[in-house]
C-alpha cells in the first residue's frame, strides 16, 4: 500500500504542475465526425482527415471518429483518405462557439462490402493503419464479420515482415522479431502488459489466445515516449472488440471440425462473437471460443556425438519419442463502452483464456556406455560384450493448464484542446501441473548378454536402428524393471500485475499544423513466483515391470518393441501406492531449488512534443523509468555422506536449505525521436531512433543457488544472479513506403540495433559468488555487446485493375534479411570469446500469399519460409544447436452461400514440413531432434446475423 500511495502522490503533484505550466486555451470552434464505410457497418480506423485550408491533419480513432479542436471560424474543406477507397471532400462551417459535425462515408467503385469484408478489407485496414502510424509498425486486422486469417495470434503474426515464429508440436507459439529472442519482445492486451504464465521467462506463448476474440494486432517496431520502454524486438499490441467499433450490431457463430492425419481424430472448434449498442451511448461486445485439438508427433532425438579411435562418429544416446497430445483452448472476452457525455468516454474490457495440454509421451532410449565397437561413415555398431547398453522405456502422463486473465477500466475526456486519458488494470497469468507422472521409467542394462545394436546414420535427419543380435532379450517387457516414478505433486507458476496510468495532452492549433504537448505517468506493480514440489518413488517390492502396463505404439518412424500404455503406469501407481517408497533426498533437493518470488515495481513518467501537418509528423521526448526489485529464493546444498559442511561431518546424504533475499533498484532515461514525412501523396518516409531496455528474466534474477558437495568436499553449483543488469539498446530505423492508388503498397525498411549487457551463461571455476565457494558453477552473466542489422521489404496489391475475372486476385509478399551477431564465452570462459549469430535469428525469411475473392468465392494460398537459426548455445561451436530451414504451405477456401452463411475449409501444412535440429559435428549435420506432424484439415461454417 505504501508503494501505491507514494506513486499516487507523485502522480497528482506532477499532473497539477503540468496543467499549471501550460498556457490557457484559446477557445474557438471544434470539428468532429465519424468516417464510415458506405453501408455504415463500422467506423474506419486510421483514415486520414485533412483540414485543407489550414493544413491540419488527424487520424481517425478505432471507432472512426476524428476531432479538430481550436479551429477559427470560417468555411472549410475536409479531405479524407483511406487505402482502397476514393478520396473524399466534405464542406463544413465552423462558428465561434459550439461543435460542427461532419460524418463522412467513403466510397469505392468496387461495391459497399469491399472496405469492410474479406481479404481486401483486411489488407486495406492493415495498410491504412500502417500508413498513419506514428512509428515503424505492421498491423493485422479482422474484417467486419470477424474473419481473421489464422487460428491463434502467433500463427497470424507469421505473415508479418521481420517475424519468425518458433513452433511447438507443429503450432506457432513464441514470436521472434528481427532475429531477437522472444524474451526481448513485450506483449500487451488492450493496453495491459500480459504477464507470462511460464515460470522461467517473460515472453508469452501467444497460442494461449484465440484469434476469434481479436480485433487487431499491431507490431510496433519503434517506440515513442508514451510507450513502455521494455522492448528491443517489438511491442506486440493486441486489442479485442469494442461495441463502438461498429455502427451496426453484429452476431456471428462459427462451428468447425479439425482432422489431423496422424491421429485420425476429428475434433471440434466453435465460437460466438457479438457487438451491440444498447443505447446511443452504451455498448457491449464480446465473444466465446472453444477449440479442441488432438494430434500426434513422431520424434527422434540424439545427443553426445563423438568419434572413436577408428574415426567412426556416433551418438552415445538416442531417443525415439512418440507424442499423443490433446490441447483445449477456452477463451472469452467482454467489453462495455459508455459515452458519459459529449466529452467523456469510459470503458471496461476483460478477457479470460485457458489453455490445457494433456501430453502422453512414450520414449525408448538407448544409452551407450562405451564407444562404437565397429562401423563406417554411415553406421555404428554397439555390442554389449564391449560395453554396457542400457535401454530405458518410459511414459509421461502430464496435464498442464495455463490461464491468462486481464481487466482494464479506463476512459478519456476531451474538452477544447485538452485531452486526458486514464486507466487502471489487473492481469494475472498462471501455469499449473498437479499429480502428473513425468515420467515413469523402466530400464534394463545389458552387458555380456549377447545384445548388439546397429545404428544407420545415412539419413542425417532420421537415423534407423536394428538389433544385430539379442532382439528377443531386448524386446522382453518382463526384463524392464521400474527405475523410478517422478511425481509432480505441484508445479505452480503465477505472474500478477496491477497498473495505473494518466496521460494529459494539449493541442495548439497553428497556421499550418498542430503542436501537441503531452505528459504522463504510469505505475506497474508486479509479483511473479514459482512453487515446485516433486516426489521421486521407487518400487519397494521389486515386482513392477513394463509387462504390468503394456500398451500399443502409434509411432511410425521405427518399430520400438514393448511400450507402456498411455495411462497404465498412472493407474498402477495410484492403485498400488503402498508398494512405492519415497526417495526423500532427491525429492527435497529438486523441490526446494526451484522455488522463488520476485516483486518488481516500475514507476515511469514522460514528456513529449508532437508536430502534425499534412506532410510532416515529428514525435520526440524522453521517458524515465525506475525499477525496484525484492527477490527471494533458497540456497540448497546437497551434502553427500562423509562430506564436511559448515565445520560438521555429515554421516548421511543431507539437504540443507537456507532462504535468502536481495533488493535492488536502478533508473533509466529513454529518449526517442520518430519522424514521418510525406513529400508527395502516398509516399511516406520514416526515421526513428530510441533507447530501450529489457529487464532480465525474473527467474534468472532469483537467488536460487543449487550446490552439490561430494565426499571429497568438491562443490559444483548452478546459480541465479540477482546482480544481472538489464539489456540496453540503441535502435535506429529508416523506412520508405509507397501506397498505390488502389489497395496496395510497396515498403522497404532498414534497421540497426546495438545491444549492451547481453545475458549469457558462464561456467566459472574456483570462485566465490554471493558468499558461496565453489569449484565449478554455471551462472548467467552480462556479456559483451551484440549488433543487429537488417532489411525488410514488402509488397501487397489487390489486382482489381485486371480484366474480369482476374480482377479478384490479391498478392502479398515480404522478405526480411537479418544479420544479428554477438560474442559469447567459449566453454564458459568469459576471456575467450567467439562470434555467433544471435539465438532465434534467421538470416532470411519470406512470406507469400496469393488470394482470390470475387462473388461468393474466396481462396488463399500462403507460403512461409525461414532460414536456419541458432537455437541453443553449446560450450563450443561444434556443440551449438541449430534448427534447420522451414517452408510450409497452407490453403483456405470460403464460399458465401447467402448474406448470412459462409462455408470454409483449410489445409494446414500441405507439404508436411518437418522440424529438424542439429549440430555441426565431424563435417555433417548431426541429429539432435527430428519431428513429423502431418497435415491438418479444417472445415466448417460461419453464420452472421
Image (cartoon, rainbow, N blue to C red):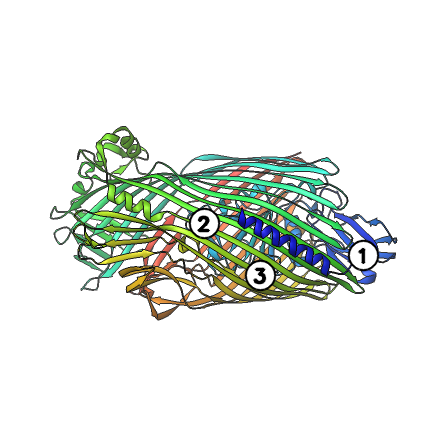
Report the disc number at residue 624: 3
Q: Residues within 10 Å of mark 1 (few under 14, many from 20)?
A: many
Is 163 placed left or right of 662 in the picture? right
Q: Residues within 10 Å of mark 2 (few under 14, many from 20)?
A: few
Residue plotted at (39% across, 62% down): 781
In front: label 3 or label 1 = 3
Q: Quadrant of residue 894?
A: top right
Q: Quadrant of residue 219?
A: bottom right
Residue matched to label 2: 911
Label 3 and label 1: CA atoms lie apart by 31 Å
Q: Position of residue 305 (x, y in %)?
A: 26, 59
Q: Position of residue 535 (x, y in %)?
A: 29, 40
Q: Position of residue 103 (x, y in %)?
A: 79, 47
In front: label 1 or label 2 = 1
Going from N to C along the chain, the mark reached first, 3 or 1, is 1
Residue matched to label 1: 70
Going from N to C along the chain, the mark reached first, 2 or 3, is 3
Amino acid at each position: 500500500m505504501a508503494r501505491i500511495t507514494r506513486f499516487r502522490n507523485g502522480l497528482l503533484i506532477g499532473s497539477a504542475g503540468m496543467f499549471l505550466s501550460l498556457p490557457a486555451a484559446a477557445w474557438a470552434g471544434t470539428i468532429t465526425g465519424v468516417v464510415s464505410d458506405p453501408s455504415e457497418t463500422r467506423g474506419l480506423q486510421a483514415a486520414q482527415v485533412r483540414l485543407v485550408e489550414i493544413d491540419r491533419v488527424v487520424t481517425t480513432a478505432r471507432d472512426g471518429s476524428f476531432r479538430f479542436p481550436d479551429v477559427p471560424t470560417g468555411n472549410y474543406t475536409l479531405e479524407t483518405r483511406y487505402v482502397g477507397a476514393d478520396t473524399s471532400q466534405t464542406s463544413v462551417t465552423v462558428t465561434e462557439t459550439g461543435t460542427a459535425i461532419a460524418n463522412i462515408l467513403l466510397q469505392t467503385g468496387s461495391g459497399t462490402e469491399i472496405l469492410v469484408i474479406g481479404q481486401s478489407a483486411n489488407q486495406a485496414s492493415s495498410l491504412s493503419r500502417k500508413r498513419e502510424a506514428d512509428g515503424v509498425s505492421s498491423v493485422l486486422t479482422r474484417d467486419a464479420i470477424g474473419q481473421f486469417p489464422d487460428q491463434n495470434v502467433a500463427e497470424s503474426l507469421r505473415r508479418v515482415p521481420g517475424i519468425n515464429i518458433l513452433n511447438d508440436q507443429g503450432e506457432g507459439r513464441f514470436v521472434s522479431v528481427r532475429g531477437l529472442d522472444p524474451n526481448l519482445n513485450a506483449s500487451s492486451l488492450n493496453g495491459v502488459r500480459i504477464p507470462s504464465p511460464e515460470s522461467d521467462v517473460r515472453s508469452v506463448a501467444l497460442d494461449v489466445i484465440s484469434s476469434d476474440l481479436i480485433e487487431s494486432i499491431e507490431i510496433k517496431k519503434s517506440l515513442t515516449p508514451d510507450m513502455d520502454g521494455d522492448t528491443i524486438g517489438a511491442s506486440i499490441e493486441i486489442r479485442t472488440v469494442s461495441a463502438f467499433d461498429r455502427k451496426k450490431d453484429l452476431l456471428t457463430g462459427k462451428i468447425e471440425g479439425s482432422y489431423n492425419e496422424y491421429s485420425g481424430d476429428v475434433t471440434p472448434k466453435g465460437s460466438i462473437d457479438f457487438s451491440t449498442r444498447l443505447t446511443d451511448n452504451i455498448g457491449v461486445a464480446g465473444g466465446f471460443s472453444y477449440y479442441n485439438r488432438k494430434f500426434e508427433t513422431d520424434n527422434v532425438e540424439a545427443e553426445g556425438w563423438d568419434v572413436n579411435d577408428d574415426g567412426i562418429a556416433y551418438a552415445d544416446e538416442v531417443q525415439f519419442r512418440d507424442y499423443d497430445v490433446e490441447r483445449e483452448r477456452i477463451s472469452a472476452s467482454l467489453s462495455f463502452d459508455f459515452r458519459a457525455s459529449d466529452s467523456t468516454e469510459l470503458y471496461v474490457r476483460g478477457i479470460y483464456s485457458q489453455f490445457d495440454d494433456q501430453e502422453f509421451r512414450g520414449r525408448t532410449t538407448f544409452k551407450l556406455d562405451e564407444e562404437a565397437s565397429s562401423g563406417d561413415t554411415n553406421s555404428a555398431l554397439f555390442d554389449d560384450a564391449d560395453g554396457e547398453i542400457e535401454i530405458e522405456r518410459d511414459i509421461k502422463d502430464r496435464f498442464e493448464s495455463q490461464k491468462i486473465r486481464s481487466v482494464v477500466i479506463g476512459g478519456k475526456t476531451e474538452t477544447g484542446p485538452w485531452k486526458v486519458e486514464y486507466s487502471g488494470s489487473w492481469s494475472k497469468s498462471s501455469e499449473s501441473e498437479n499429480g502428473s507422472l513425468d515420467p515413469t521409467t523402466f530400464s534394463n542394462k545389458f552387458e555380456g548378454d549377447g545384445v548388439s545394436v546397429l545404428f544407420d546414420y545415412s539419413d542425417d535427419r532420421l537415423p534407423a536402428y536394428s538389433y544385430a543380435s539379442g532382439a528377443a532379450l531386448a524386446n522382453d517387457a518382463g526384463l524392464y524393471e521400474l527405475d523410478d516414478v517422478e511425481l509432480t505433486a505441484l508445479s505452480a507458476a503465477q505472474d500478477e500485475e496491477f497498473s495505473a496510468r494518466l496521460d494529459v495532452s494539449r493541442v495548439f492549433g497553428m497556421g499550418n499544423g498542430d503542436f501537441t504537448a503531452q505528459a504522463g505517468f504510469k505505475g506497474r506493480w508486479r509479483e511473479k513466483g514459482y512453487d515446485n514440489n516433486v516426489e521421486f518413488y521407487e518400487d519397494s517390492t521389486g515386482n513392477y515391470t513394463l509387462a504390468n502396463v503394456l500398451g500399443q505404439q502409434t509411432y511410425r518412424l521405427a518399430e520400438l518393441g514393448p511400450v507402456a500404455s498411455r495411462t497404465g503406469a498412472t493407474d498402477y501407481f495410484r492403485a498400488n501406492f503402498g508398494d512405492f517408497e519415497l526417495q526423500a533426498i532427491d525429492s527435497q533437493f529438486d523441490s526446494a531449488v526451484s522455488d522463488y518470488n520476485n516483486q518488481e515495481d516500475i514507476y515511469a513518467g514522460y514528456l513529449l512534443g508532437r508536430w502534425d501537418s499534412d506532410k510532416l509528423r515529428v514525435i520526440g521526448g524522453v521517458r524515465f523509468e525506475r525499477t525496484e526489485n525484492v527477490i527471494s529464493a533458497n540456497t540448497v546444498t546437497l551434502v553427500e555422506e562423509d562430506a564436511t559442511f559448515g565445520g560438521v561431518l555429515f554421516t548421511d546424504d543431507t539437504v540443507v536449505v537456507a532462504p535468502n533475499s536481495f533488493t535492488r533498484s536502478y533508473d533509466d532515461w529513454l529518449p526517442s525521436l520518430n519522424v514521418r514525412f510525406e513529400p508527395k501523396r502516398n509516399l511516406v518516409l520514416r526515421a526513428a531512433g530510441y533507447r530501450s531496455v529489457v529487464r532480465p528474466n525474473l527467474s534468472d534474477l532469483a537467488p536460487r543457488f543449487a550446490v552439490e558437495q561430494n565426499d571429497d568436499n568438491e562443490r559444483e553449483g548452478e546459480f541465479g544472479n540477482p546482480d544481472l543488469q538489464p539489456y540496453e539498446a540503441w535502435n535506429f530505423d529508416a523506412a520508405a513506403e509507397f501506397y498505390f492508388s488502389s489497395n496496395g503498397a510497396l515498403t522497404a525498411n532498414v534497421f540497426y540495433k546495438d545491444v549492451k549487457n547481453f545475458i549469457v551463461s558462464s561456467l566459472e571455476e574456483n570462485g566465490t559468488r554471493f558468499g558461496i565457494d565453489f569449484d565449478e558453477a554455471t551462472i548467467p552473466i552480462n556479456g559483451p555487446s551484440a549488433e543487429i542489422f537488417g532489411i525488410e521489404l514488402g509488397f501487397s496489391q489487390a489486382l482489381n485493375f485486371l480484366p474480369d475475372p482476374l480482377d479478384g486476385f490479391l498478392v502479398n509478399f515480404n522478405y526480411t534479411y537479418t544479420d544479428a551477431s554477438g560474442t559469447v564465452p567459449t566453454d564458459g570462459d568469459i576471456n575467450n570469446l567467439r562470434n555467433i549469430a544471435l539465438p532465434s535469428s534467421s538470416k532470411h525469411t519470406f512470406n507469400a500469399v496469393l488470394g482470390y475473392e470475387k462473388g461468393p468465392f474466396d481462396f488463399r494460398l500462403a507460403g512461409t519460409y525461414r532460414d536456419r537459426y541458432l537455437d541453443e548455445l553449446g560450450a563450443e561451436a561444434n556443440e551449438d544447436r541449430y534448427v534447420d530451414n522451414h517452408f510450409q504451405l497452407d490453403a483456405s477456401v470460403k464460399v458465401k452461400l447467402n448474406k448470412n452463411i459462409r462455408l470454409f475449409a483449410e489445409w494446414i501444412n500441405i507439404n508436411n514440413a518437418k522440424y529438424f535440429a542439429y549440430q555441426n559435428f565431424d563435417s555433417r549435420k548431426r541429429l539432435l531432434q527430428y519431428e513429423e506432424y502431418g497435415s491438418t484439415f479444417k472445415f466448417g461454417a460461419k453464420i452472421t446475423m
